[in-house]
Amino acid sequence: MDLARAEPDTLRYRLLHLPAKLATHARRRVLSIPETWPWADAFALCWQRLTLLPLAT
């Protein structure tokens, strides 16, 4: 994965230009990313890992 060695500016640019929709359904957040986007798998994996973190209380 080329994002593993990316500079912070590169990650920020790609994150800010992410063609995705974030929606809430049944108190859950759902991230929709087009499969044709080059870094869709990397950001989907990142989203999955973030949702597994415990909520701050």
Image: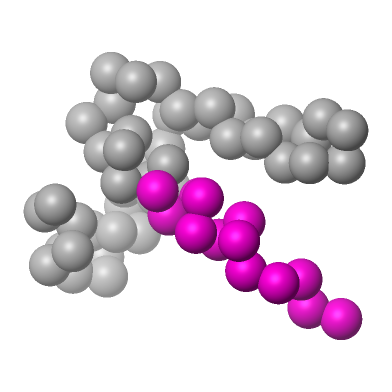
Magenta stretch: dominant secondary structure:
helix
Residue 42 x %, y %: 30, 46
Image location (x, y in percent) of residue 17: 39, 39
38 relative to 44 in the view: left or right = left
Query: Residue 54 vs residue 26: left or right?
Result: left
Q: Is residue 50 magenta?
A: yes
Toward which corner of the image does residue 36 lie, by quadrant?
top left
Q: Residue furthest bottom?
A: 57
Task: Locate residue 27: give its quadrant.
Answer: top right
Residue depicted at 79% across the width and 41% down the height: 28
Q: Residue at x 18, y 64 (%)?
A: 4
Q: Is residue 51 above or below residue 19?
A: below
Query: Relative to the observer, which residue lies in front, 9 or 1?
Result: 1
The vertical placement of 30 against 50, above or below, is above
Residue at image x 35%, y 59%? 12
Magenta part of the protein: which range?
A: 45-57
Quarter of the image with the C terminus is bottom right
Residue 51 pos. (x, y %): 62, 56
Residue 39 vs residue 57: left or right? Answer: left
In the image, is 7 to the left or to the right of 24?
Answer: left
User: Which colour assignment does the render follow?
Assistant: one colour
Query: Magenta span has 38?
Result: no
Total number of numbered labels? 0
- Name the spot of residue 23 as percent of width and height, x first: 72, 32
Q: Quadrant of residue 24?
A: top right
